[in-house]
Image (tube, helix red, strand yellow):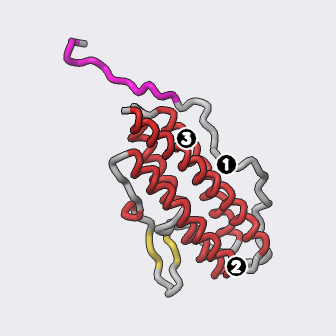
Amino acid sequence: MGENNKMTTASCSFAGIKPIMADLPYPPIAVCQRNQTYADLLSVDYCGAVSELSAITQYINNENRLSCEKCSMAKTLLGIAMAEMMHLQKLGELIVLLGGDIDFTAKQNHGCRKMWTPEYLDIPVYVKQMLLADIEAEKAAIKQYRAHIRVITDDCVNAVLERIIKDEEYHIMLLQYLMEDVSCQACEQ
């Protein structure tokens, strides 16, 4: 290779990254009985505008953009994305047990089906705005889960949703810590 053809490589190793979740067990993935209405509600959590699929995609995008300059932060975002993948998988199982289909469409109250789209994502340029968008997305997810818990009377389903909320609250705490770190770095410059 000539002088002008120097290879650039990624220096951030993601070996050994694990899902970042609250250190609590998950309840069994079970339902009291089949219920299409509940499956439709969970499809919104699965792949609606505020959903686990949106969270995964947004975290992976942010992690990719930060990995070369902010490796430690990128690793945290990847670990959170992995936890969101676990949530997606658990919701998918619940949807199937409730009698629903996994087809990446959220079933709305008025009977319309809306296919997941990247238009749901918030992709800011700057790190602080990325973290703020992630915090707001986590808060919106918690609010939506709580609204669904109020409608769903299946204790098995609600136990899983309550456990997912604990992870989302933990993610907010970690993201706020990262925000403080970014703010402190800005003060030093």
The single residue placed furthest to the front in the displayed view is 187
Write the residue at 53% across / 37% down.
75
Residue 28, placed above or below residue 155: above
Which x, y percent locates residue 153?
Answer: 75, 80
Within-10-Å neighbours for mark 1: few <14, some 14–19, many 20+:
many
Write the residue at 62% across / 73% down.
100
73 lies left or right of 157: left
- In what element is the residue under mark 1? loop
Q: Which circle marks residue 152 in the picture?
A: 2
> Quick check: marks 1 and 2 in contact, CB under 8 Å?
no
Write the residue at 49% across / 46% down.
179
Which x, y percent locates residue 27?
Answer: 79, 60
The Cα–Cα distance between marks 1 and 3, rounded to whole angstroms, is 11 Å
Which stretch is magenta? 2-13
106 lies left or right of 87: left
Label 3 or label 2, whichever lies nearer to me, is 3
Q: Magenta stretch: residue 136 in it? A: no
Residue 184, placed above or below residue 38: above
Q: Amino acid at mark 1?
A: Met
* Chief SS of the magenta region: loop
The single residue placed furthest to the top in the displayed view is 2
Q: Which circle marks residue 76 in the picture?
A: 3
Within-10-Å neighbours for mark 3: few <14, some 14–19, many 20+:
many
The front one of 175 and 2 is 175
